[in-house]
Amino acid sequence: MMKAILLRLACLLIMMGGIGHAHATDAPRRVSVILDWFLNADHAALLAAQYGGAFARHGLDVHLIAPADPGAAPRLVAAGQADLAVSYQTQLGMLSEQGIPLVRVGTLIDTPLNTLIAAGNVRSLADLKGKVIGVSLSGADDAVLATMLSTVGVGMGDIHQVNVNFQLEQALMSHSVDAVMGAVRTYELIDLKQKGMTVTAFFPEEHGVPLNDELVFLAARDHIRDPWVRAFMAALEEGTNTLLNHSDEILSKAIADHPELDTPLNRAAWRETLPRLAKQPALLNARRYRAFTAFLRAHGVISHDVALETYAVDPFALVPETTP
C-alpha cells in the first residue's frame, strides 16, 4: 500500500513540475493557437489569460491566429504548422476515424451552442414538416437535425434541405428558407433578434441529442504529454477565473486592441458566453464523450467504434514520458 501511495505521489510531483511557473531565466515557450473563426466572445477566456498575465506566469508566449478558412485549424495542427486548434467535439470522432492524429486536450466552451432557428409561423418542431431548412455542414449536423425532428415524428424526407454555404442569417432574413440548422445561440440568434426578426430557437440537447462540448482544443497526438500543454491549460483555468471576476475590464482591454469587437452584438455575446465557459478546461467528462461518439456511430456519421483515449484526454491524468 505504501509503495503504491509513494508511486502516485511521484507521478503527481512529475506533473506538477511540468506546470510550474517559469523561472525568470527561462525563455517563454511560444504556443500558436489557430482559432475556429474570427476573434469573438467565444475566445474571451484566452484573452483574459493573456491580459491577466496567466500565460506569461506559466512560461508561455501565446499567439492567437484567426484562420482564413474556418475548417483549416485541425489540418494546420496535424501538419505541424500550429500547436493547438480550437475546434468542435462534434468533429472528433470523424477526425479519429480518418486517422488524423489529433487529440482533445482541453475545452473552451463546455455546453452546446449549436441551434436550429426558425422564422415565420414555425412555433414548434412539428411545424417544420414540408418546410425548407438551410444547412451549411453535413455529417454531425444532419444527425442532430434528424434526431430533433424524429422526436415529433417528422422525418428527413418530410423537409427540404438546401446548402446555404455558411450564410445562415442571410438565408433566413431573405426568406429563402424557413429555418437554419447550425446557427450559434450566442451569435446568430442574438444578431437576428437585434435586427428585429421574430425567431424561434430549438436547442438540440432538449430534443434527443446528447450533451457535448462546443469548442475544444486539439493537439497533435505526439505532443499531448508535453509540459507546455499542461501549462497552457493551467493558465487558461486562471484566465477563466479572472474573466468571471473582471469581465467588463477584460472586455474593455479586448475592445482597445480589437475595435471590431465594440458592437452591440459582441457586447451581448460576451455576456451570454460567460456562463458557458469551461471552468476546468483540462477536465474530461469521459461519460459524455463516449455517449456523443456512440450517437455519431448510431447515426452513421462514423462507421465504427472509436476508443476514447485515441481522441480525447485530460493532460493532467497522463504521466509524462521520460527520456532515457
Image (cartoon, grey):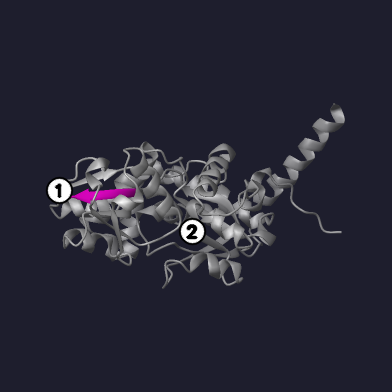
Three-letter amino acid code at the position of disc 1: Thr
Mark yes or no: residue 183 visible. no
Magenta span of residues = 115-119
Q: Position of residue 52 (x, y in %)?
A: 45, 52
Mark 1 is surrounded, within 10 Å at the Cα level, by few (under 14), some (14 to 19) or many (20 or more) other residues, namely few
Q: Is residue 31 above or below residue 293?
A: below
Q: Earlier in the sequence, mark 1 or mark 2?
A: 2
Q: Classify residue 123 as left or right of residue 19.
A: left
Give me the residue at 58% from left, 64% from top.
Answer: 83
Pointer 1 and pointer 2: residues touching (CB < 8 Å)?
no
Q: Nearer the viewer, residue 43 or 188?
A: 188
Three-letter amino acid code at the position of disc 2: Val
Q: Position of residue 253 (x, y in %)?
A: 34, 57
* Residue under label 2: 86
Q: Is residue 153 above or below residue 258?
A: above
Give me the residue at 22% from left, 63% from top.
Answer: 170
- Residue 159 is covered by the magenta coloring: no
Q: Nearer the viewer, residue 7 or 93?
A: 93
Q: Classify residue 113 as left or right of residue 123.
A: right
**Quadrant (top left, top right, bottom left, bottom right) of the N terminus:** top right
Label 2 residue SS: strand
Give me the residue at 76% from left, 42% from top.
Answer: 11
Q: Quadrant of residue 252?
A: bottom left
* Residue under label 1: 198
Q: Classify residue 91 as left or right of residue 157.
A: right
